[in-house]
Amino acid sequence: MTKYGKFAIALLAATALTTAAADARSLKWARSGDSLTLDPHAQNEGPTHNLSHHIYEPLIHRDSQGKEVPALAVSWKVTDDASVWEFKLRPNVKFHNGSTFNADDVVFSVERALQPTSDMKGLLTSVEKISKVDDLTVTIKTRGPNPLLPNNLGDLFIMDKEWAEANNATKVQDFKNKEENFSVRNANGTGPFQLVSREPDVKTVMKRNDGYWGIGQVPLEITELVYIPIKADATRLAALLSGEVDFVQDVPVQDIERLKSQQNLRVNIGPENRTIFFGMDVASADLKGDSVQGKNPFADKKVRQAMNMALNRTAIQRVAMRGQSVPTGVIMPPFVNGWTKELDAAPTGDVNAAKKLLADAGYPSGFNVTLHCPNDRYVNDEAICQAAVGMWGQIGVKVNLVSQSKAIHFPLIQKNPPETEFFLVGWGVPTFDSEYIFSFLYHTRDAKYGSWNAIRYSNAEADKLIESLSSETDKAKRDGTIAKLWALFKEETLYLPVHHQTLAYAMKAGFDIPVDVSNQPKLKYLSFKTN
Amino acid sequence: MIAHLIRSLLQGILVILAVGLIAFSMFRFVGDPVASLAGQESTDADRAELTERLGLNDPFPIQFVRFLAKAAQGDFGISYRQARPVADLLAERLPATVELAVLSALFAFIIGVGLGVYAAINRRGLVANAVMVLSLVGVSLPTFLIGIGLIYLFAVELRWLPSFGRGDVLRFGWWTTGLLTETGRKSLVLPVLTLGFFQLTLIMRLVRAEMLETMRTDYVRFARARGIPERRIQFRHALRNTMVPVVTIVGLQLGSVIAFAIVTETVFQWPGLGALFVNAVQFVDIPVMAAYLMFVAFVFATMNFLTDFVYVLIDPRLKA
């Protein structure tokens, strides 16, 4: 026990140190907004689902590229009856409190999500009934065939029926009640992390679920996950620079270069499932907010084409977005079924051709119109509008810009009839299928469809084709209809696409968290680098 | 005297009611909570149903009366944003704001009076003049810039202090405090400096001006003539007379520091009432906004009442 003995001890001690480090690995994760509630069916909203994805699980979830991956269901198929889907559930899964996951929990959760006070019911409108077949099989009967049902289940989280019953949380929060629902600040899921403590707007602490079914299939190396909302951009970045947090979302585009220049940081940039575009009233006989009397200039296709041509998308990308966007010619993100390169090709800006079209339409000296724009919803939304206003000014269309908070902007679009005639909006597609875009943005506004169709477009023939999509089970035929609809809508120039939004995540260099297309990073996939 | 106090009490209640009424009439301009509450997939019918369920179709005087009737029973409704009772939220956030406000008021008062006296006594000194120039910067720089500057210096560059949050807090009943833990105390430093800086410069300039004024009065000259030591004149006689208006201002400022710590709380992600209010405005969380504004009106009314009460004690003429 001389030299070698000491060396062996030192070696042992070093090994002990590394194992200890491997055992306790925490990740502090900051984002601008907090989850609103842990009740998985009360809010259909990004940051809320994002946190829930770590504690709860849906039947089918999506990885960072938007690909469907089995979660609590291992397989699913349409039965012989085309309007019944069958889901085989994952065996040997336990909730965090130890109770076993089975078909009763799925039936309970779907029925809970269908309650009138649930915010998730909008994705489940086709569901007629869910039934248990045996402990690990459920069937969902839809009103007519619905080939897209699995696409709607990506954020539909499964709760433990017994837990909800024991804690009086079987109903989704109703804002008329005085009481707080137990599920708002408590959770019992099957997910990779288990809730330890939650202080809304301060922090949420989770620890690794050591009994997680996916151990061995996903890295799940984080032992403690701390989620911290930090609202002010400068403070959030300061917390990363000072090392107080390890990973931040919602990085402002103007800070990306500065963060990239830091040796100890990594910035990942990737496209988001969201497209930004302008919409305008294409149908009313006259516009209230324009300078043209008795006529609606936007009803003329030539005017819309001129407005579209006047947009210099690469300039918007360069000036308003500091290069962080993907200019496009279609209001559909690239991950969506129906997307093609040809549709996506952005028209090049051409002021002279646009002026000529405008003159042909009878507006050689242009006209005045009002544009509504949000200033706190999308990346640099107000700057996009300002840039576009300048470009339209070049062809003589004088745009009066009204920028306001999203809480005022969106009601203008959602009111029926809409209270805006020209607006900016962004659209994400949680089902990853064109039908979602068509039915909300292009279908004639009625009780079931078109609740975001503020352009007042109405085409009975297109409506029929859109409706057929939800029940057409022949994929080739269905895709044919989608292509036909896109060709029609693009020819009509109903919306003016600007770009696909991109996201930036900043983190310590030891991590490599890919940008999630739904902006919902799922940290069970994270492995620590060994450098 | 009783009549005077009752009158100011009634005035206070009237102010609270008026603030509430004005607040309610403004909510429609903040936006529509249904747009934040109903998911992207909601249909027109869903939105209409939710609007009806929240009682937003009623004219605002009716909404206001309903709010008052419930508030009188201690029921401020459920937050739209967080789905929790508003009274719980306010109670949970109050300690953070009060701790921050009281500490920064103390900081501003002690340092402000000290520097003010110093600047008055050494009117022509180099240091005193430098302090006066610096105080101009303090008055003119916006709070959020001061906050961010401090964060970059002390959190990012020097890494001495945390950049956000409250650190670990200890709980006593419903009250929480960060004063008893190390991370809690460290977390307090930067927000207290930021929030107190403007008050500090204000108090300092006020003390200096008042003190200079007092030093020119006859009784100070007579005191000097009698050969009383200069220190004694400055601190026993002049400062005391200077403090009357200063204390009044500090009392009133404490109210506004509690009520309007909004910017500081946002910059430091401080979990107080101001941050709660900012989030509520963006979400159009009407129950929280209403309760918060009523609370602010209450704080001001109370401060005003207390000031009146102190005046009565000080000014013998009011006792008649």
Image: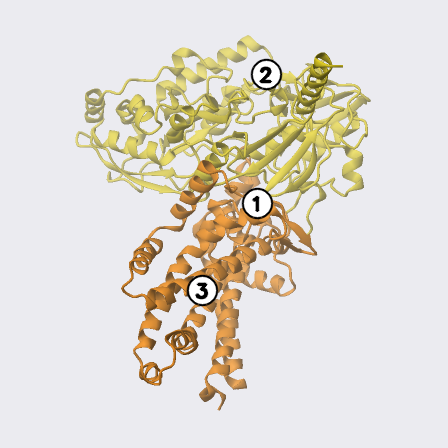
The numbered disc on residue B50 is none
Is any atom of residue B28 visible in this view? no
- The shade of chain B is orange
From the image, state whether disc 3 or disc 1 is nearer to you. Answer: 3
**Label 2 residue SS:** loop
Q: In the rendered view, would you say A318 is above or below B310?
A: above
Is any atom of residue A212 visible in this view? yes
Question: Mark 1: which amino acid?
Answer: Arg
Chain of the residue under label 1: B
Spatial separation of the CA atoms under disc 1 and disc 2: 41 Å
Chain of the residue under label 3: B
Disc 1 and disc 2 in contact, CB within 8 angstroms: no
Do the residues at pointers 3 and 2 share their chain?
Answer: no
Spatial separation of the CA atoms under disc 3 and disc 2: 54 Å
Q: Residues within 10 Å of mark 3 (few under 14, many from 20)?
A: some
Residue designated by label 3: B253
Residue designated by label 2: A530
Q: Residues within 10 Å of mark 2 (few under 14, many from 20)?
A: few
Find residue A188 and report its image quarter. top right
Residue A92 screen position, x and y as percent: 80, 20
The numbered disc on residue B81 is 1
Earlier in the chain: of badge 3 and badge 1, it is 1
